Image (spheres, grey):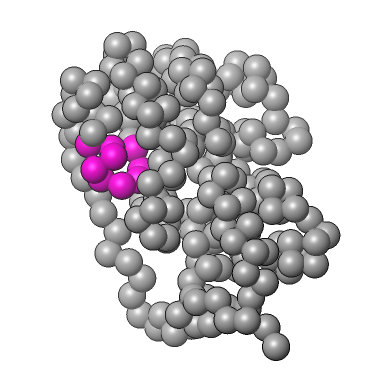
Amino acid sequence: MTNTLHRRGSLEKLQSDYVIFAGTAKGVNRKQAAAKLQEFARICLKHRPANIGCSKQGNVLQEKFDVDTFITKIEDGHRVNAVFTDLAALQAVVEELARADLGLCIVISGLLDGAQSCCHKAGIERHSVESSLGFWGATDRLPEREILELNTLCGHGMVSFNFVRKMIEQVKLRRLTPKAAARMLGKCCECGVFNPARAEQMLEQILEKGGTFSQPGLFTKEP
């Protein structure tokens, strides 16, 4: 799952940002997988994810989203995603998945040490590792670091740079709370990997500092 590999942020911030996916491979374990994917969703929901969804149905931050309907409409070829801000909760999910032995393809996206710890405590070994090498090319054309941190919470780029700027402006003008703005940003991420709790924390920091952005991503005070 390369779409979540490019999340930006400090080590401290990434310690509260883990995504877990369940999917299938065509011709291998996709046939009659719907019930197993539904059970994966139930296990994740039991441990209170910050977000959950799939690209075919959207995510829990959207008004149209109904959890019961979401589960019943999961089909064989769907990929179900959930976001956790607490490593202990993710640990509980992994342990329960190991016991359930659903036969699905499970991927954890986040800090390698955290993912490895969850696997070992559940008595399993990870199959492989995929890492991001960062951004290459004309990086001077990228927006400020803070914008990228919010934008890359949606790996498919559905949360645009300009929409992030608009939400930041609305928060600074006190027209939206950080929580409301984070939820609006998260609605755009159809597959449900956006972390609204982390986005809220970043927006709160912007509000507290009352600053503008410099290119390296440091806050500078407005005149």
Q: Residue at x 58, y 81 (%)?
A: 220
Q: Residue at x 53, y 68 (%)?
A: 146
Q: Nearer the viewer, residue 54 or 167?
A: 167
| Residue 115 in magenta stretch | yes
Quarter of the picture containing the C terminus is bottom right
Give the x, y percent position of residue 205. 59, 61
Give the x, y percent position of residue 182. 65, 51
Q: Is residue 159 above or below residue 61?
A: below
Q: Residue at x 34, y 37 (%)?
A: 108
| Residue at the far right in the pictured view | 175
Figure label count:
0
Quarter of the picture containing the N terminus is top left
Q: Is residue 161 left or right of residue 37?
A: right
Q: Quadrant of residue 165?
A: bottom right
| Residue 208 in magenta stretch | no
Q: Quadrant of residue 63?
A: top right
Q: Is residue 121 visible?
A: yes
Q: Is residue 84 left or right of residue 100?
A: right
Give the x, y percent position of residue 178. 69, 53
Q: Quadrant of residue 124?
A: top left
Query: What span is colored magenta in the figure?
Result: 108-116
Q: Is residue 185 visible?
A: no
Q: Residue at x 57, y 44 (%)?
A: 197
Q: Is residue 168 above or below residue 70?
A: below
Q: Is residue 108 above or below residue 168?
A: above
